[in-house]
Image (spheres, rainbow, N blue to C red):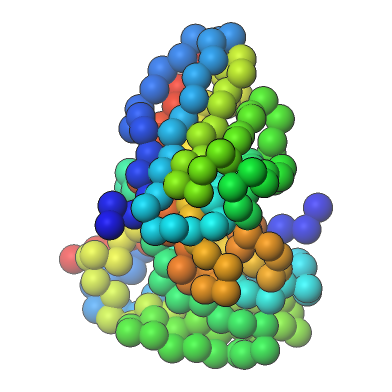
Amino acid sequence: GESVGLHLPTLSVQEGDNSIINCAYSNSASDYFIWYKQESGKGPQFIIDIRSNMDKRQGQRVTVLLNKTVKHLSLQIAATQPGDSAVYFCAENRGNAGNMLTFGGGTRLMVKP
Amino acid sequence: NAGVTQTPKFQVLKTGQSMTLQCAQDMNHEYMSWYRQDPGMGLRLIHYSVGAGITDQGEVPNGYNVSRSTTEDFPLRLLSAAPSQTSVYFCASSSPGQGVDEQYFGPGTRLTVT
């Protein structure tokens, strides 16, 4: 079936460096793409989203890039901090009733001090 | 506001037992949903509701029942627990028109079935 998936299961970066987390999706009908951060023992926390009619969106220290040609999504975190250590999920929403989400498999980001 | 609350936080069941996972939200959200998260994986949708009295199946509904008698509560019932249902369960809520960035997740219930 159609799914959203991630390339790298674990990413280790030095504090202060930039991090890039990638995600591939297969459903070209998706309207929304969302990045979530999940810390150990907690529920997913919204980071940033992007609509399918955009190719870039910036937040505080985070940027999401969408390449619809190759169905690829990335999350860039600038000046990575120890508090950024978590598992990051991409998810897609197809604009359906109930705001239902289809999640990818997750990437664990480890920040070394 | 307490947001989305889930009880219990942890639960151990024997195969064949039944139980109900509770989810409540105090934000007057119309949409509520249940996801399960297996180790190292993303969340998968079990059931969802777009309003009181309305429920529908998600990606992995087998073995679970839901009901939505009030806007605030959306309990998830395991009728006969199986080891394959060992997982972390998350409840989420949102409102129509607010978009997915307004979807709030609860802290999760960790369930182990032996």
* Residue appearing at x 67%, y 25% in the figure: B63
Q: Look at the picture and state if B109 lies above or below B94.
A: above
Residue A24, image quadrant? bottom right
User: Can residue A11 be seen from the camera position used here?
Assistant: no
Residue sitting at the far right: A1
Q: Foreground: B104 or A32?
A: B104
Left or right, A64 with reference to A31: left
Q: Foreground: B97 or A92?
A: B97
* Residue appearing at x 58%, y 9% in the figure: B16
Left or right, B31 with reference to A95: left
Q: Foreground: A89 or B90?
A: B90
Left or right, A99 with reference to B111: right
Residue sitting at the far left: A113
Rendering coords of residue A5 (x, y %)? 64, 60
Q: Look at the picture and state if B3 lies above or below B16.
A: below
Quarter placement of the C terminus of chain A? bottom left
Rendering coords of residue B65 (x, y %)? 64, 30
User: Can residue A80 be seen from the camera position used here?
Assistant: yes
Rendering coords of residue B68 (x, y %)? 57, 40
Q: Look at the picture and state if B50 lies above or below B61.
A: below
Q: Look at the picture and state if B38 lies above or below B95.
A: above
Rendering coords of residue B8 (x, y %)? 35, 29
Total residue callouts: 0
* Residue appearing at x 69%, y 36% in the figure: B61
